[in-house]
Structures are given as C-alpha cells and as structure tokens.
Amino acid sequence: MNTSNIPEMALEFGLSGNEYELTIEILGREPNITELGIFSVMWSEHCSYKSSKKWLRTMATEAPWVICGPGENAGVVDIGGGKVAVFKMESHNHPSFIEPYQGAATGVGGIMRDVFTMGARPIANLNSIRFGSPDHEKTRHLVSGVVAGVGGYGNCVGVPTVGGECTFHESFNGNNLVNAMTVGVADADKLFYSKAAGLGNPVVYVGSKTGRDGIHGATMASAVFGGDAEQKRPTVQVGDPFTGKLLIEACLELMATDVIVAIQDMGAAGLTSSSFEMAGKGGLGMDMDLDKVPQREDAMSAYEIMLSESQERMLMVLREGTEDQAAAIFEKWELEFAVIARLTDTGRLVLRQHGAVVADMPIAPLAEASPEYDRSWTAPEPRAVIRVDDVPPPDNPSQALKTLLASPDLASKRWIWEQYDHMVMADTVSGPGGDAAIVRVHGSQSALAITTDCTPRYCQAGPRQGGRQAVAEAWRNLTAVGARPLAITDCLNFGNPERPEIMGQFVGCVEGISEACKALDFPVVSGNVSLYNESDGQSVQPTPAIGGVGLIDNLDATASIAFDGPNEVLVLVGDTTGHLGASLYLREIAGREEGAPPEVDLEAERRNGDFVRGLIQSGRVTACHDLADGGVYVAVAEMAMASGEFGADLTLPDDAGTPHGFLFGEDQGRYVLAVSEMVGRAILKEAESAKVPATVIGNTGGDSLTVDGDWPISVSELRAAHEDWLPNYMAQD
Amino acid sequence: MTAAVIVFPGSNCDRDAAVAIERAMSKAPLMVWHRETHLPDVDLIILPGGFSYGDYLRAGALAARSPIMKEVVARAEAGVAVLGICNGFQILTESGLLPGAILRNAGLHFVCRTVALRVENNRSRFTEQYALNEVVHIPVAHHDGNFRAAPETLNRLEGEGLVAFRYCDDDGDPGDSPNGAARNIAGILNDAGNVLGMMPHPERVADARLGGTDGAKMFDGLAKVLA
C-alpha cells in the first residue's frame, strides 16, 4: 500500500473531498493512515447511515411493550412473564455475492452476535434471500453457496433456522440479497447495553484472534459493484461457527454474573466501531494498547488491527477488579481474553503500538457528528391501474395454478430449509412452510410467532404501497397463526442513493412502512440499511424486508395452514376486487411486469386481522392462511398440499366478477379460514356485525381441487409440480 | 436413577436431551463438562448431538479423545447404559465403543427432516418399549450420517441382531435413507447391548407439542428399566 499520499488514499477509501477536509478540521492536522482508515469506515454508508438517517427518524418506533428501540445492537420487546424478545435483521448482500458461503455464514454469525450481546439467548434464525433470474449463469452457484453458508453457521451453533423467504428476479443478477434475522429471549432485568461507564474500568477483548480478513469490508459494502467484484474477495470475512457457539456460551455465562458494565460485538468496522460506539455513548475516552490485542498473524499494523473484520470477537467494559473472574470463564471455553484498554475522561481514542501513539482522535465528532445527507429524490411516475378485463384469462385455470405453484417464487423451498436444522433446541412448534414460524418460549406455554416478508415487485411498482404491503403482510402472517403482532425489524435494501430515482424508492418505501407501523401498532425496533445494491448500473428491485415478531399466549389456540379434514367450510375474509396489477399471475402467466400494486387499506387490514385473530384465539378455526402471491386459488392449493391429503371444491361467489380476477387477484388484507359448518354460519354473522367482509367460497374434501365443479386437478399433481422445481433446478449442471 | 449428559465444546443438543430425560425420569440429569476426569455413579450416560469441536478433523474424532471419554469407555465396559445421539453416535464410533465409521451424507448436504425408522431390535433397554418392526417417526439433522462398515462387520451386526433402527418408508418397507447409510442402518448396539448409537434424534420427539412422541418411548423405557 502506498501511504505517502494521504489525500489520494482518502478517495480510495471512499471518502469524498468534503469529508476529507472535515477530517483535517476535526484533527487540526492531516490524518495518518490508521486515522484515515478509521474515519473512512466510521463514515461509510454502512456504518453511518448518512444517506438514510434523515428518513429513518420518521419511523414509528414506540409502543407500550417496546423496551428498546433502534440504536442499540437489537430491539427489545416485552413478552410477559419477566421475559423479553430481542431481535434484529441485517444484510450481508455484498459479501455473499463475492463469496456466497462465507458471506452468508458470517451474516448469520453477525446477527446472532448482535442479539446475544444484549444478554439474550438466540432461539431462532430466519432469512430473506433474493437471487437473480434462474436462467442467469451465476444463480445456481449463488443459491448453493448461500444456503450452505446459512446452514453451516446456524446448524453448528445450534440455533434453529425456522423460516424465511427466497425469490428470484433478474434485477438481482449482479447483486443478490442475503438478509439474516435472529430472535433471542432474555430476562427483562438482565439486559446489556453498549454505553461505557466508569473511569479507569478495564476494556476487555474476548473471542477469536484478530487477523487480516475483512479489512475494509464496511467500505466495500458501501459501493456499487463494477466488473471487479471478484477482486474484492479479500474484504470478505471468514466465519468460525464453532468459536461462535463457544462465544455465546461464554458470554451468557459471564452475563449471569454482575461484572459487565457494557458490551458490544465487533461487527462491521470491527474494533474501530465497537470502541468508538461504546466510548461515544458513555461520553468517555479510551486509551488502548494494540500490542495487547490477540493477533493471528505477525507484524499486523495498527491500520490492519483497527480495520479487520475478523469474526467472533466482542468488546466489553468490566467492573474494575473483576478481570480474573471473567478471564476464568473465557479460559474454560478456550477463548481469547485480554484487557486492551482503560476508560479515560479525555473524550479521545488514543491508540498505542510498540510504545508510540499511532492514533489520537476525538470521539464525539466521529461517532455522533458524522456526515448526514439530504439526498435529492424523485418520486416514480405512478403506474396505471390495470383492469381485470385488460388481462387475458387462462385457457385452463387449474393449469395456470399448477404453473404458478411451480414458478420459482412460489415453488416449495424444501430443498433449502431441509439443509437448515429447524428443530434444534426442541422448542420449534411450527417450522418452515407455514405463514409464520412458532417457537415456544423455553419452559413456558407461550410462544413467539416469527416471519420475514417483502414483495419487491410491489415496491418497484409503487414504493409507498409496497412499503405498506411488506409491513401488512408480516402482520398478517403473524395474525394467521393466532399471534398478537408486537414489532418489526427492517432491512432496507436499495440501489445507489446518489441517483434521485433510487432515493425516491427509498423515501416512498419508508413512508409506506411508517404508515403501516402506525396504523397497525407494529413499531420498528431495530434494523439495517443496505444501499448501493447495484451492479453495472442495474439496481435491485427495492426490497425493504420486514421481520415481524408476535406473541402467542396460549399454544392451544393457534392455527396452521393445513386442512384438518373433509367437509369443512372455507371462508374468505376481506374484500376481493380481482386486482391483477403487478401480480404474480400477470408476470408468470401473462408475461407482463406492469401495473400499479394493490392498495393496502390499513384500516380494513387491521379490522380484518383483529377479527381473524379473535376467531383463532377462541379455538374455532381449524386452518388459516393469509392471502398473498397468486391470490385465493394459490392459498387454497397450499392449504390442501400442506394437509397431505384433502382437496377442496371452490364455489365462485355471485359477485366474484371475472373468474381469473377472483382466483388470482392479489387484493390485500385477506385470509382463508377452514371451519366446521356450524362455526361457519356463526362467524358470517359475527363478521357482519364487525363490518368485516366474509364469504363462503367452498368446502374441503376429496383429493383434488375444483372450481364450481370444473377444472379438477389432483392435490398430488399440484404437489409434485410444487416440490420438484427447485431440486430439479439445482440438479442441473 | 441418575443420568449424565456429557457436554463437549460445540455440543448443542445437550439441553434438549436433558429436558427429555427430566420429563421421563422426573429428575434432571447431571451435566458433565468434557474436561472432567471423573464421573459420579450414574445409570445412564448420554453423548448428545451437536458439533463437538466444530466437526474439525472428523465429526466426533476430537471429542472421542476428551478427558471424560476415558471414564465413559470404562463405564460402558462395566455395563452402564450409554446412548449416543447424532454427534454422540459419531463419538461412539470414533472412540471404538461401536464399530464402523460415519461419513459425509451421500447427497453432500446437511439434511434435517423427520424420517421413518423400523425398530429391528426391541430387546435392548433402549428399545424395549417399542414393538418389533414398529415404524416410528424421528427427525434427523446431520451432515455426516452415512454409516459404513466392512461387509463382514455389517453381516455380523445384522446376524447378531445389533441393528436397532433402520431407515424405511412409512409402511416399514426399505426406503431411501437420508444419508446413504450402508443397508439403511440408522442405529446400532454394541455386543453387550448397553451402548446404542443412532443418527436420529429421539429427544426431539419426546413432547407432543413438537409434533410427535415416538422418541419419548425410549426415555420412558430407560426410566423404567434403570429405576
């Protein structure tokens, strides 16, 4: 590395000319290479949220059950019984495209660290992954590597991967998305935060040694890909899930004592961001001896030590005098333990190496006064609303259904989730394949319902509605299993924010998310922004992935999507107009990606969902499924396939309008319930008084699906098409 | 009776096994750290599932050389019941308590799914609650479950009735194994019948809430026999 020309290096490190001037102003002199590296990662988009924070502040983040909102390692909500749920979702898109196995594995490892840093034992992992077109030459390799990486880390650590989503679109050809979510449970009175306190207290490094991997990873994740993505492989971190597992156990063991003052994991920007954040939040300084940092390689420079993103490391502030007690625990787990710094009152980070001061920087301006941009943005032109009559009907609806169920987005993802241990910890009541996973709170009769969701094609078609829809669908998924939705984490994946049309997508989606969060009392408690997801000028579809968490008080009153038997009545809850704009039918059957997305009426959403949840909690619903991609017909087919044997006869209501609009339309705020005939009659009345639209649309029975007695197709034929697509695709050379 | 669960660095089904034992025996097992060199008097030793030592070198190879394993081998030879589940089975073959070796799955992927097993020996203390040839459903979750042994060893295991469980279809007929194991073998006993190694996880189906109780029979049976 040429270190003679600092201004040139600043550009190489991703700092703008103005940002470089600011570093000189803050230091009162030109930064050295180590300091420059620190400035550049702290002010990278990834760490500073400089393009997004203006908008993130507008989000709804509060509710009576929220204990800790955005700003800490993860969000915290009260789940009763003296327990809290701690959760967050985070992206690892760029590294996973460069090196899919390690990129995905360290994404999972990183998000688990965020959660156990707060004192919670991780109890569930989920993910939201998006790949390019199945026809693209890299897609199969990326799917294979990402899935193996997600499983490789989670399986080894022994935290079940209980759900997720995986879709394909050509916009992701040059930039796949890997978003990982972890949910943990902690005692409400045993939470840990990152604010350093106590002059002279020891700052302790634990976990793995520091190596030369992942240097400048945060900067790489803050730039678009050109043709040189492959060359960035050295910036990808390498995970060691075995050490990750030991680190969880050692940290939780130490947390059971009372020696920790503050704790922070070393994620993006490693030792740099963890030390700045801890000292910055506490208004203190830190005097650090880099010679004490456990190192994997010889002759590491201060710059390399501070910028390394080696995995499985934590920084903590202990109470003075408790070092030996803490060290014994890490010795038991055979992990590194070193006192590397002391807290000072200087407000500065002073780094020493080989007896000399190698960096001396004020903390507040870096940690808190980092740049913030009000990027210019333009709202996209609203798309025309497509009328049902403008969309050709299928020749044979049941064959169209089969085509949809075997299309890449809807096809069974069993090939993926069977590579994830979704049962370890022996509390998975309902794993992958349902509307939401259900994970019991260990040793209790309550459970968390968890889901991840987003429909990128809606966000592309209309960012505001797309943002609303992502939140509403997560809320609906939780409702459909009988859970009370509590809060969300979000992972906002967009292209280059310096392009006004991309920034417009971001602003629109955030606006929609905020509206939905407020209307549904479903606040954002944690999240992550990933920008610059584009390659050679092609941006990904806007993808604000939402991870939702809900509470089930009584495990005896939940619902699954599987039909439980024949002769049950199917009740459709919610309004159906036959909206086919931006639908899966339009794309997969008619070959058109156009039209406005469905509107999300948040009042109706709430009314319908509250009604359905009440029915499930009263124990009267035998199966429930929320309606999403592919509409009523796909939902009923999924309920039949999940049952293993029972089919259904659908009856088009008198006011159904055009059959393909009714069957495949994607109007929002809807559910299909299976109930006994007697319950069916009762709930139609209850729906009427609750002003909730509800209609009988058929009944269960037989071993095939029919519509008004026509177009019979056997459930086993549908299941074969649905199950075979992904394994067949992955088996091709 | 008293049970012990051995905890290796990287074990991750130790708690699950402890919960299943406590449910069956109304008494929590001892959790014994791998560095211990002495085991208290116990009637049952469980080597739990997980990734001991990160599966580095070979699955189970390093754990088999942990300090506590000398004690486990001595107790097994003295007739104490030892149950190795998944990684525990790998440790049992690596430590020589059971014959054969366990290789990477034939499909090369980690596989987690509930599989059908046929009970082939219901005379052991682990399996006496099952009917002979009963089909049970128990999940597997492993990357290395492909049991292999020399043909003469396999013949001997079969001839002496030491195959405890075999992968089958829902009707009990030979079916696809999830891992390519020789002769569809999912679990085997030692000659004396006091050591069982199996890839499937009975502790994951010991609670009706989790979708099955076919594994509970094993723990209930042990509680009865060892009481």
Image (cartoon, coloured by chain):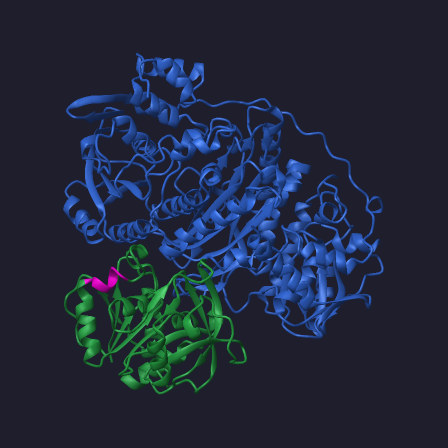
Residue numbers of the magenta segment: B61-66
Q: Is residue A190 magenta?
A: no
Residue B62 screen position, x and y as percent: 25, 59
Residue A129 visible to the viewer: yes
A20 above or below B65? above
Work out whether residue A456 or residue A243 is closer to the camera in this orientation and state it.
Answer: A243
Residue A273, above or below A442: above
Residue at 22% across, 77% down:
B76
Quadrant of the snapshot with the C terminus of chain B: bottom left
| Most foreground residue, A239 or A270 | A239
Magenta stretch holds residue B62: yes
Query: Which residue is more in the foreground, B194 or A673?
Result: B194
Q: Residue A350's quadrant in the figure?
A: top left
Number of marks in picture = 0
Residue drawn at x 44%, y 14% as measured from the top left = A17
Name which residue lies at 79% across and 58% down. A397
Spot occupied by residue B193 in the image (x, y as percentages of width and height): 29, 82
Identify the residue at image location x=34%, y=25%: A38
Please indicate whether residue A568 sits to the left or right of residue B12 in the image: right
Rendered hue of chain B is green
The x, y position of residue A329, in whole percent, is: 20, 51
**Chain A image colour:** blue
Q: Residue B28: image x %, image y %?
A: 28, 72
Q: In the rendered view, would you say B98 is above or below A297? A: below
